[in-house]
Image (cartoon, helix red, strand yellow):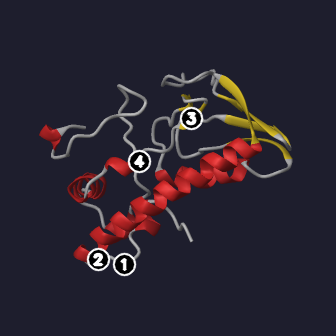
Amino acid sequence: MNVNSGYGELHGYPLGSGLYPVSQFSSRDISRVIELHVDDLVLEDCCALFGGFVLVGDGQPIFVPQCCSTLADISSWESIARSEVFSNYFCLEGHPTPQATSNGESIQICCIDEGEAFFGPAPKGYSLSRSSLAEALTQTHQSLKEFSNKLEGWGSANGYAEVSKILIYDLS
């Protein structure tokens, strides 16, 4: 994304990726993103905005969203933060799909798929504590709430109420 495409100056994270922190988006950028996302569809029929969340541990990306991931993937991260034993796939809108396994205290993330390679500068597997994931989710929710407010500003100016429930998901 760059100025020639109708955006302000945005800096990808991780460096060189096509992923941009929502905190960088200006009102003009938001208008452009929505215009491209909706295209000739009815806004109410659209899915959440494409993208997702880069999970960072020790200052390094440990998970990078994959193809077709959306901002609604936050609900998948919430589902694996629970304090119980489980093993399931998450971020199901994207592909390939990572797998999470938990012993109740720590969560192991596996980014290996025999049919499709994961991309991005992140390890193929890692472990993190539930408390670390909970802290990351708190920070992500704060960023999403701020982005939601910007989306609602766009919606208000363009006649759409609660647009963030469509383009992110219901944060309440």
Q: Position of residue 75 (x, y in %)?
A: 61, 55
Q: Position of residue 131 (x, y in %)?
A: 74, 46
Give the mark toward the camera: 1 or 3.
3
The reply to whether dot 1 and dot 2 touch (C-beta < 8 Å) is: yes
Mark 1 highlights which residue? 161
Residue 57 location, quadrant: top right
Regarding mark 4 in the picture, which secondary structure is present there? loop
Mark 3 highlights which residue? 56
Q: Position of residue 100 (x, y in %)?
A: 73, 37
Mark-to-mark CA distance, 3 and 2: 33 Å
Mark 2 highlights which residue? 156
Is 9 displayed left or right of 14 in the figure? left
Query: Which is nearer the eye, 134 or 170?
Result: 134
Quadrant containing the C terminus in the rendered view: bottom right
Neighbor class of circle 3 (other Cα within 10 Å; few <14, some 14-19, many 20+) is some
Query: Which is nearer the eye, 15 or 125?
Result: 15
Q: Amino acid at mark 3?
A: Val
Which of marks 2 and 1 precedes in the sequence? Answer: 2
